[in-house]
Amino acid sequence: MEYFITLPMELQSVIGSEKVDFTVLAKRNQPLKKSMGLMIFGTVWTAFTSIFVIAFLGPLFMGRESHFTVNGVPTTGSWDNFQPMLVPTLIIGVFVLVGIGMLGWGIYATFQKGGYFVGTAHKLIHYYKGNIHTYDWEQFSGNMEINHLKGDLAMQLRTGKMVSRKNSSDEFVPDIIYISGANNILEIEKICSKRIKENDPTPVNTSIVL
């Protein structure tokens, strides 16, 4: 099988004389499952907050007054007397914008390209729109998740962050590098696994889910 494609000149200059194991152009920045999940959550969030927009501002657009309670005190608002409605409107607006933002980011992530990935004997190189990131194989823990039907490979790094959990101890969430929508992903996974094991024969045993 073919593991190599033509690379941009600036990426070739970074590789230099290193031995190249594979080159791949990823079709997506991340698995579709993650993008779709964000889109669905953003849609539900926006639809839910829109209920408050309709209930709160709907009467005004119909030429009527809006009746609500502030600190237990019945209050009336209208276009001529909008000041009592200003703060609640801003709060609702922020929640709506958050939902629209999540929906928009999910749509953007769905169509965002993944860029070029190059595996060498010593590191993995990622190139996207002129930005180049390099990862030594020893930076990877060796934990991987692969979906060969969709051409997705997730590789866990040793870096990450601690995330607080309700009613439980904090959890370490590792950074993950995604190669998504790639051809020959099974062969690429084998090469990556081989290089990671050469640099660290005792990876941490945790699981990740695409």
Image (cartoon, rainbow, N blue to C red):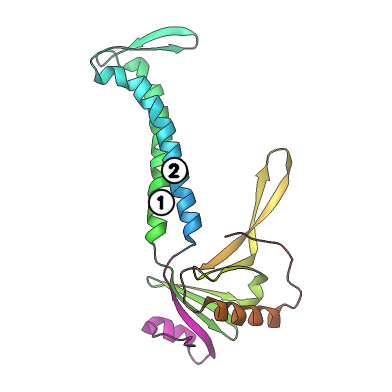
The magenta segment: 1-28
**Label 1 sits on residue:** 105
Q: Position of residue 10 (x, y in %)?
A: 39, 82
Task: Say which of marks 2 and 1 sits in front.
Answer: 2
**Label 2 sits on residue:** 42
- Pointers 2 and 1 in contact (CB under 8 A)? yes
* Residue, far right: 202
- Give the mark nearest the N terminus, 2 or 1: 2
Please name the residue shown 41% across and 22% down the image: 88
> How many tags in the picture?
2
* Residue, far front: 149
> In front: 199, or 57?
57
Is 4 colored magenta in this rendering?
Answer: yes
Please name the residue shown 38% across and 85% down the image: 6
Is 27 colored magenta in this rendering?
Answer: yes
Tell me if residue 41 comes above or below residue 12 in the rendering. above
